[in-house]
Amino acid sequence: MLITFEGIDGAGKSTQIRKLAAWLARKGMETLSLREPGGTETAESIRSLLLESSGEITPLGELLLFSASRAEIVQQVIIPALESGKTVILDRFYDSTTAYQGYGRGLDLDMLRSIIAISTCGLVPDITFFLDIEPEAALMRKFSEKSIPIAFDNSELDRMERSGLEFYRKVRAGYLETIALEKNRFACLEAIEPPDAIHKRITGILTDRFNL
Ligand code: TYD
């Protein structure tokens, strides 16, 4: 089974992924938690390029780099893990590309769909949890996580996080449109709820849908 988590930066995905992995392990399920971009040596190098580079990257270049990283992790890690019966929990997958590069950067959505189909080898998650949060609240969380004074020194933020509030508004709107088109695959959660309450909802949904 492939479970993915999506949401704008600062929505609290990592906390939920940790809790879910522990819950699945207690149920005796073999799980593998991964994040995108990254997950193989090459994909981690691409991640550094994407997040730490100070040079300019065009939206098309950005799309192709995220997609190259995805092609690596899908073929080298995710497909073999699924084939061996593991449950894979993925922190971001192609819905991030639709939301960030499509709606955020404004790239053509049809072109994106073709590239996504290629880079994922056609793999579709069994369920995608979307942690919804207002961009303002999400950025505040990032600032406090990284102990950045609110009086705005954004040099601690990564290249994507420096894209600004307006960008994150478009990304969130993109997620919401994507979800409206594929209601069955997504489960939406309010990220401002306490982490334990969100975790309970997640395990409840998995129990209902997949008899876990
Ligand atoms: P990361 O530090 O993993 O962010 P988070 O903790 O919020 O998941 O950085 C990943 C960044 O890359 C994040 O800003 C979202 C962005 N991204 C894209 O723009 N497109 C993509 O296809 C993926 C996978 C991520």
Image (cartoon, rainbow, N blue to C red):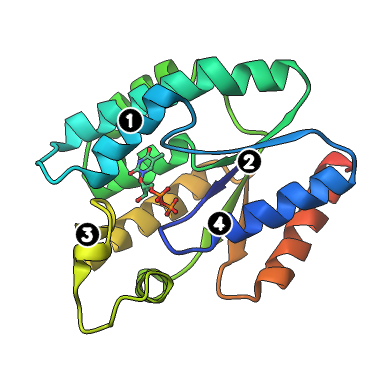
**Dot 4 corresponds to which residue?**
13
Q: Nearer the viewer, residue 211 or 54?
A: 54
Alpha carbons under labels 1 and 4: distance apart: 22 Å
Q: Earlier in the sequence, mark 4 or mark 2?
A: 4
Of badges 1 and 4, nearer the viewer stands: 1
Residue nearer the viewer, 37 or 205 = 37
Q: Earlier in the sequence, mark 3 or mark 2?
A: 3
Q: Secondary structure at mark 2?
A: loop
Beta carbon at label 2 within 8 Å of ligand 1: no
- What is the three-letter code of the residue carrying label 4? Lys
Label 1 element class: helix
Whether residue 93 sits left or right of residue 148 in the image: it is: right
* Label 1 near ligand 1 (CB < 8 Å): no
Sooner in the amino-acid sequence: mark 1 or mark 4:
4
**Do the residues bearing badges 3 and 2 touch, measured as CB atoms within 8 Å?**
no
Q: Which is closer to the viewer, label 2 or label 1?
A: 1
Residue 52 in percent (x, y) is at: 24, 46
Q: Which mark is residue 162?
A: 3
Q: Is residue 95 above or below residue 166?
A: above
Q: Which residue is mark 2?
A: 185
Residue 45 numbered mark, or none: 1
Query: Which amino acid type is marked by label 2?
Result: Arg
